[in-house]
Amino acid sequence: MKKANERSVGDLVDPLNSVLAGRRSEAVGVLRADGEYRLVTLRSVDAGERLFRMEGEEMSRPSRYSVQLAEDLHLDLEGGQSMEEILDRYYWRFMNHSCEPNSCIRERDVYALRAVEPWENVTFDYNTTEYEMAEPFECRCASRGCLKQIRGFKHLTDPQRRRIEPLLIPYLRNYLHRPLCQAGWADPRDSNVPTV
Ligand SMILES: [Zn+2]
């Protein structure tokens, strides 16, 4: 059986099995197939291109779908929205995680890390934004460097942190370069965090 990310474009656009909705960005849309919603590209995208800007409610605590933008700042869906409103305004919520993502988040903007073909899943690495996941999950991205368990930056080893350093959202990059005594790490694995 094929994995989801091995589907052909023909599978994805089959009108009997999928519904395309949420086209606030002309670059991405939400696809429903096999009972799951996924954010996909609607056209070819260049490396470095801004795909869309995330809108939402700023919260002090994480939730299952929120994205962390700073120490105590999590972007979440506004409550009480219909699915149509979520598809139109909060489609970023359908971005999937990948350990080898094709996009990254800068402030509230999502940029392509490489050229992306039409109908590819738009993915980002939760470990580059979340310090500690509200709901850790098992990753099945099948990339060579897949970490399997996605729990947040706090739980990465130092080499794993170094590997994703260029993609880290700024507040997490600050953790990397903050002296240990100021970083407040409780995890002994963090003893090799540089004190630059
Ligand atoms: Zn993975």
Image (tube, helix red, strand yellow):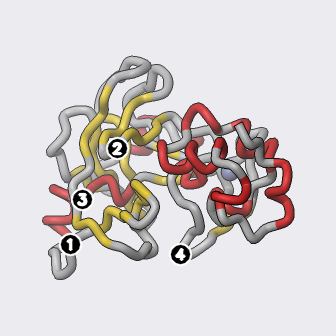
Q: How many marks on residues?
A: 4
Does label 2 or label 1 sit earlier along the sequence?
A: 1
Q: Earlier in the sequence, mark 4 or mark 1?
A: 1
Q: Amino acid at mark 4?
A: Ala
Earlier-in-chain disc, 1 versus 3: 1
Eye-nearest disc, 4 or 2: 2
Could you say where residue 31 lies in the image, as x and y percent from the top left?
A: 33, 52
Secondary structure, mark 2, is loop
User: Where does residue 144 sit, x and y in percent of width and height?
Assistant: 78, 39
**Residue at 40% across / 44% down in the picture?**
12
Q: Residues within 10 Å of mark 1 (few under 14, many from 20)?
A: some
The residue closer to the viewer here, 18 or 79, is 79
Alpha-carbon span between mark 4 and mark 2 = 20 Å
Give the residue type at disc 1: Glu
User: Residue flagged by tag 3: what amino acid is it?
Assistant: Tyr
Q: In the rendered structure, which disc, 4 or 2, sits on the residue that comes first in sequence?
A: 2
Q: Which residue is mark 4?
A: 134
Q: CA distance from mark 4 to mark 1?
A: 17 Å
Q: Is residue 64 left or right of residue 173?
A: left
- Secondary structure beneath dot 3 equals loop
Badge 3 is on which residue?
90
The reply to whether callout 3 and callout 2 are in contact (CB within 8 Å) is: no
Question: Which label was assigned to residue 78?
Answer: 1
Label 4–label 2 contact, CB within 8 A: no
